Amino acid sequence: TKVTTSCRVSVPAVAANERSRVTIQYSSMSHDVPFGSNFVVQEQLDLVWDENGCSCTITKSVRLIFLKSVGWLKGKIQSSVLTEQNKSSELLLAVLRKRVVETSRIEKAVATQKGMVWEMQRRTTLFSTDWQAPFLPHDHSKRWCWLDTSYTRHPWMPVETSREDAVTCTTPPLRLGDGWRVLGKWEVSTNGCDEDDAGWQYAVDFYRHDVLWGKAHTGKHCRRRLWTCDFQEEDGSPPNPVLATDLLKFSESQLGC
């Protein structure tokens, strides 16, 4: 496959009491696939070392940007990109685990992962209390109710889950995959000042910026709350001290369509 890839590596200066960090960014365009010049896949790897410099947390983020319209192939391209990114993430983990096993100075540990999902709701009027999953046509993927940090259908939601089933769930209907076990249960995450007693934040629309959300619901049509849950590799999985957290986020934006 012919691919044009740009790479940027950033190593910011840190103070004595801060953790070292490396950020690697990729931007790739495929030339011999249908409509390959109409979209760009962007990846970012963030590596943050612990205080001892013996292990690090790796976070991988992926974004698919459409430069031109691809018609009915948009959904297929999104699905293919997400599938390939999952494969490449597993390959990356395999390479890092093998490297760790070969490096005797790094002691054995177990990989853990924190899951995060936003629950979104909208009410029909400012005077009603019938909060429900977003239902307006312009809500688009927010109508799935359970969203990632990019406000799209969460990638951990099983493919067989329909939107009708998802919006009736009272806890996140997510599944991380084989080889992982849940530590505890899904819980609403709060900081004690920007949410109401149930963890909800309110706004006039589904904004991405946190500063536009608050706990006052008067005059607000929309609300959201963050759920989190910890996962751990099951016994028998390869040792993985390098990866304290493996978080794959998939987001998509459309430009010029």
Image (spheres, grey):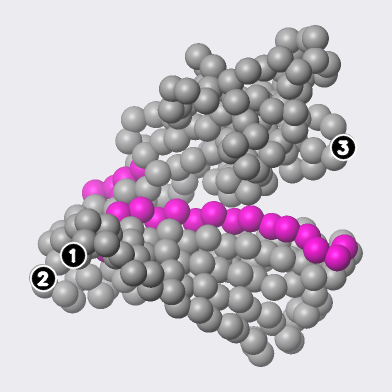
Image side of residue 91 versus residue 213, left or right: left
Query: Mark 3, residues whose alpha carbon is within 10 Å: few (<14), some, or many (≥20)?
Result: few
Q: Earlier in the sequence, mark 3 or mark 1?
A: 1
Q: Please give the residue where the numbered disc 3 appears in the rendered image.
A: 137
Span of residues in magenta: 231-257
Residue at x 18% of width, y 76% of height: 102
Is 252 a magenta residue?
yes
Q: Residues at badges 2 and 1 in contact (C-beta under 8 Å)?
A: yes
Say if 36 sits above or below 168 in the image: below
Question: Is tag 3's residue or tag 2's residue first in the polypeptide sequence?
Answer: 2
The residue singled out by tag 2 in the image is 105
Left or right of 124? Residue 145 is left
Whether residue 166 is visible: no
**Image quarter in which the C terminus is found:** bottom right
Q: Say which mark, if any, is on residue 54.
A: 1
Dot 1: element: loop
